Image: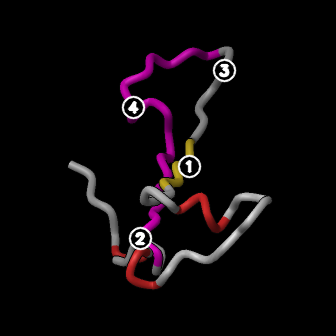
Amino acid sequence: KYELRRDNFSSTGNFGFGIQEHIDLGIKYDPSIGIYGLDFYVVLGRPGYNVNHRKRKSGTVGFPHRLTK
């Protein structure tokens, strides 16, 4: 029913999308809460990706090991 556009993807394979109304998820409407939207961001990684983010002995992720579109 829903499809992601090409613009939703980053150059590293991560993607994000938004839902305008929480009712689209099948959640029952509660007048005390109102209507709200949600944004989702998905960050993909491989084993060994932590090398780039750790504090001690940090390194870089090689180009062949990175995720792409």
* Range of magenta residues: 12-31
Counting the numbered discs, the total is 4
| Labels 4 and 2 touching (C-beta < 8 A) | no
Q: 14 left or right of 4? A: right
Q: Earlier in the sequence, mark 3 or mark 4?
A: 4
Question: Depth check: 56 or 5 in front?
Answer: 56
| Labels 2 and 3 touching (C-beta < 8 A) | no
Please, is residue 21 above or below residue 44 in the view? above
Which element is circle 3 on?
loop
Q: Residue at x 34, y 77 (%)?
A: 69
Q: CA distance from mark 3 to mark 4?
A: 15 Å
The residue indicated by pointer 3 is 33
| Labels 4 and 1 touching (C-beta < 8 A) | no
The residue indicated by pointer 2 is 13
Which element is circle 4 on?
helix
Kind of residue at badge 4:
Leu
Q: Earlier in the sequence, mark 4 or mark 1?
A: 4
Which element is circle 1 on?
strand
Quarter of the view holding residue 50: bottom right
Q: CA distance from mark 1 to mark 3?
A: 18 Å
Q: Earlier in the sequence, mark 2 or mark 3?
A: 2
Residue density around tag 2, few if under 14, some if 14–19, many if 20 or more, within 10 Å:
some
Residue 23 within the segment the image draws in magenta: yes
